[in-house]
Amino acid sequence: MSGDDSVAAGAAWPVDLRGVTESVVATLGPNGRWNVAALGLRAPAAAGELVTATTWGNTRTRRNFHRRGGGVVQFTSDPREFVDAALTIREEDEPVLPGADAWVEVRATRVESDDVEGTRRERWELDPIESAVLRERVPTINRGLYAVIDATVAASRLDVPSYDADALLDRLAYFEETVRTCGGPAEVEAFERLGEITGWRERRRAREEHDDA
């Protein structure tokens, strides 16, 4: 992707992965633009295995993986980029977002597919081709950031029949309190954006009014 000295061809992942790491992936669409979406990365269970990711439904990421055979995974600590990636249709002219701390171009190979309650699930192995670390930071723990990330997961499931919408709305209310108590300006802005996109507060108020009627 780049001739910069920080890029290593055939590189390993630019960050240490454990459990499931939340990332943002850019995949090139048929219109020549990069679709940006959230993607959970599952670390290998044993040496010699590859990182995997799962796509659910007929998403742009799934279709572009099939068309192009890969994409650009990136790591960012900007909660606003996570909200847009997880809950909106975002397209960019370039694959790497301004807030990315590192990126890795991957080859995506489908290794498993099935249907879960009518939703197509496909599991992909991700093999790194080249990568770059753009900036290094001292890691800090902020509950507001993690609340935003968890909130994007809850919000993305609101209209999925197999999930309890009332429970998800209550969870979002808890995350909102956490963000307002512990988050900084970026986290608060990200959560406001999440509310505008999903309308979850209005849905929760309507439920409460119905229960009180």
Image: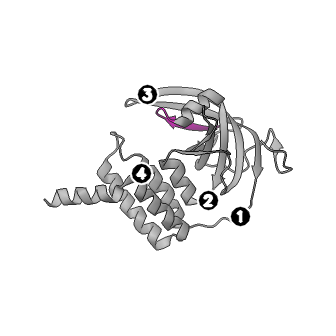
Tell me how the rendering is colored.
Answer: one colour
Say the numbered circle drawn on residue 154.
4
Q: In 3D space, how far apart are the residues under numbered discs 4 and 3 (Cα atoms)?
A: 21 Å
Which quadrant, please, contains the N terminus? Answer: top right
Looking at the image, residue 79 sits to the left or right of residue 28; the answer is: left
Which-is-in-front pick, marks 2 and 3?
A: 2
Q: Amino acid at mark 2?
A: Ser
Q: Amino acid at mark 1?
A: Arg
Looking at the image, residue 56 sits to the left or right of residue 171; the answer is: right
Identify the secondary structure beneath mark 1.
Answer: loop
Across and down, in percent, residue 78 comes to: 59, 60
Mark 3 lies on residue: 115
Decide whether the magenta segment is chiefly helix, strand or loop: strand
Across and down, in percent, residue 168 comes to: 35, 52
In the rendered structure, which segment of residues is drawn in magenta?
Answer: 50-59
The mark nearer the N terminus, 1 or 2, is 2
Identify the secondary structure beneath mark 4.
Answer: helix
Crowdedness of circle 1 by 10 Å Cα count: few (<14), some, many (20+)?
few
Crowdedness of circle 2 by 10 Å Cα count: few (<14), some, many (20+)?
some
Mark 1 lies on residue: 137
> In the figure, 129 relative to 15: above or below?
above
Comparing 42 with 9, the one in front is 9
Quarter-wise, where is residue 40 in the image?
top right
Is residue 50 visible to the viewer in this orientation of the structure?
Answer: no
Identify the secondary structure beneath mark 2.
Answer: loop
Q: Residue at x 41, y 58 (%)?
A: 195
Q: Residue furthest bottom?
A: 181
Q: Residue at x 60, y 34 (%)?
A: 31
